[in-house]
Amino acid sequence: MELNAATQSDLVKNAVVLWGKTVDALPTPARSSGLFDVFAVSENSGDTRDVSEIDLEQYASGKNESEQAKRAKVQQGYSKTLKVKRVAKDIGISYEMRKYNKYPEVVAKLTSLASLFVNRLELDLSHRLGFAASTSMTDKDGATVTLTVGDGYQLAYATHKLKGSSTTYTNIVSGGPQLSKGALEAAERLAVENTYNHLGEKADMTFDLLWTTDDPNVVNTAREYLQSSAEISAANAGVVNVYKGKFRHVILPRLATTAAGAVDSTKRLYWGIASSMGVTQNGVKCGIWEEGHLKLPTPSSNAEEFSTDDINFGVRGGYGIDALSGAAYKYSFPTA
């Protein structure tokens, strides 16, 4: 696409096209992973949104002749309130870029701008798993972010509480093993033996996601287990690999990062499993109040800055993230 930057009107038209193409091409591994329940919040509905969980007992009771049927137990779980956080960033397109048709510089600035909302949301979602062992964090803007779930503990915790039962559960694989066949089976056992509804009953929750960082060793190990045509430790190729098709592998490139988005090698071996069904019920919720969009200078207004001759473009967006429960996630935190 040739960029005709001769006039402000032409620049604005081209910026809209370039923005749309860039956003459509951007990867969103966290948002599209199934590890987070992402939903749109309707306009003019306030800057908060309440989310909650509710459980119904799983088994019918016996009924004698002419006896009144027992009422099913319904247990309200935990509730959280999502609050919108608005994010923004501006760039300036100089007079020289506009008038002298500096195509590469203009394109680089506008494509970079288009990625800023997408990348920030990816970072904030990924940090919910990367900082799952913490109750709070200070984000890249210096703001304190509370990371606790409904029971007041961090997302990954050894004795999570239930609302209607004295039973507690853990969602951390003991010892923090690196990803291996034995470690994966330990995580599956944790899912089988430590996943409850709020009445203390064993929850029927299928764990279908295997999430990892983008560390090459961890990624390759996961792919070997999930894609091998034979059992991963078999001497012959005729043995069925029980893990083939069992999990969908989700790679989170921004998980092993600091709050500021820099590399954090101490987290490079983190991995876990999750239930996409459980995430929808009581996992990490992400409400989108305002999708990332381009803020344009108005051609008919005095959009040009008097002192610099720059014209500003901006990205704006708003979302809120919080977690109800840790039940849908099982974690391993190996020491790197």
Image (cartoon, grey):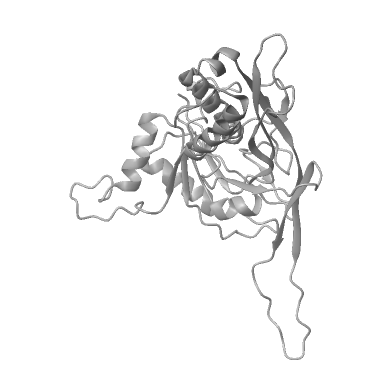
What residue do we see at 63% from left, 36% from top?
292
Residue for point 55% across, 39% down: 172
Q: Position of residue 15 (x, y in %)?
A: 56, 31
Q: Residue furthest left?
A: 236
**Along the line of sight, the residue nearer the viewer: 317 or 121:** 317
Position in image of residue 185 (x %, y %): 42, 47
* Residue 136 showing in the rendered view: no
Q: Nearer the viewer, residue 115 or 331?
A: 115
Q: Could you tell me which quadrant the C terminus lies in?
A: top left
Q: Position of residue 68 (x, y in %)?
A: 78, 84
- Furthest residue in direction bottom, as rendered: 65
Q: Quadrant of residue 145?
A: top right
- The image shows residue 240, relative to residue 258, as above or below, that is below
- Is residue 17 visible in the rendered image? The answer is yes
Horizontal side of residue 179 vs 83, given as left or right: left
Figure check: 180 above or below 138: below
Q: Determine the residue positioned at 73% across, 23% down.
A: 143
How many numbered badges does the structure rendering display?
0
Residue drawn 72% across and 51% down?
A: 166
Q: Position of residue 18 (x, y in %)?
A: 52, 33
